[in-house]
Amino acid sequence: MAIPVMLSKIFRHDCIYVRPEAGISQPADLRGERVGLPQYSSTAGVFIKGLVQHEYGVGPTEISWFMGGQDTPAPAPLVPLDLPADINLEFIPEGETLEGMLTAGELDALFATYIPNLFLNGSPKIARLFPNFKEVEQDYYRRTGIFPIMYTVVVREDVHREHPGVASSLFDASTEAKELAVDCLYDTDALALTLPFLIDHLEETWKTFGSDYWSYGVASNRPSLEALAQYVVDQGLAPRVVSPEELFPETAL
């Protein structure tokens, strides 16, 4: 039983990396290319593929996908993905990594879960597709209302049946805890995080999102929830679109 307490959210435009020699200067150029990603079915991967399709018109059937460890070799999953025949997904060879294949010219782009070591080390073999990702992501949010959700809170079904009020209690407690934590950030007596311009970051964030920029609940997160539900169908990961009302109990809506 899911509770609409969204502990982790993050925009994903900045997670799209390209090999400069591949000639990919805009998202439409990804059509027909070889793209690596650590997990085809992860929330991060789903949101990146979804925005590429719905914002830029390149669907999952128009890209050749390669799945494996980003910077460390990883085995193929024990349970294989049951994808439609028109989605081309391969597991990279044993002992290989996505970053290594990008460097060797065997991949054209990388949809990364975390910042690649190649990029951190300043390699000329990798670049962000969106160098101005903050402006792109701000515009994306203003137009769509989507702030991609990565994780939420769940309660076991047997616990919820035995204690029907647990969902609303956890939602209320989590909301109060979040508000206390956020309030502590806007304090010039002593910075709550080791970010020199934290106060400016907060004030800029309010201009984009409003005061409740990390909202919980279904209503304010509906654009993200509905987008994710559509994306997993588009990408062959679910048979139908599931509504937010099906995911969350009424006591926590």
Image (spheres, grey):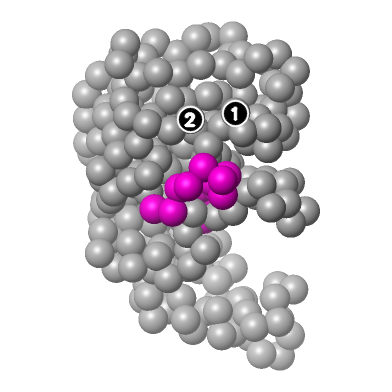
Q: Does residue 14 appear in the picture of this structure? A: yes
Whether the residues at callouts 1 and 2 have beta carbons within 8 Å, the answer is: yes
* Image quadrant in which you'd find residue 62: top left
Q: Which residue is mark 1?
A: 106
- Image-based side of 199 in relation to 241, left or right: right
Which quadrant: the N terminus? Answer: top left
Looking at the image, tell me whether mark 1 or mark 2 is earlier in sequence order: 2
Mark sitting on residue 188: none
- Image-based side of 36 in relation to 87, left or right: right
Membership of 106 in magenta stretch: no
- Compared with 213, 116 (above or below) is above
Where residue 79 sits: x, y (%)? 53, 9
Q: Does residue 172 appear in the picture of this structure? A: no
Bounds of the magenta span?
14-26
The residue under the point 61% across, 18% down is 92
Q: Secondary structure at mark 2?
A: strand
Q: State the separation of the CA atoms marked 1 and 2.
A: 8 Å
Where residue 128 sits: x, y (%)? 55, 55
Where residue 119 sits: x, y (%)? 69, 52
Q: Which three-letter amino acid code belongs to the residue tagged 2?
A: Arg
The residue nearer to you, when weighing 23 against 203, is 23
Q: Which residue is mark 2?
A: 34
The residue under the point 61% across, 14% down is 76
- Image-based side of 141 in relation to 171, left or right: left
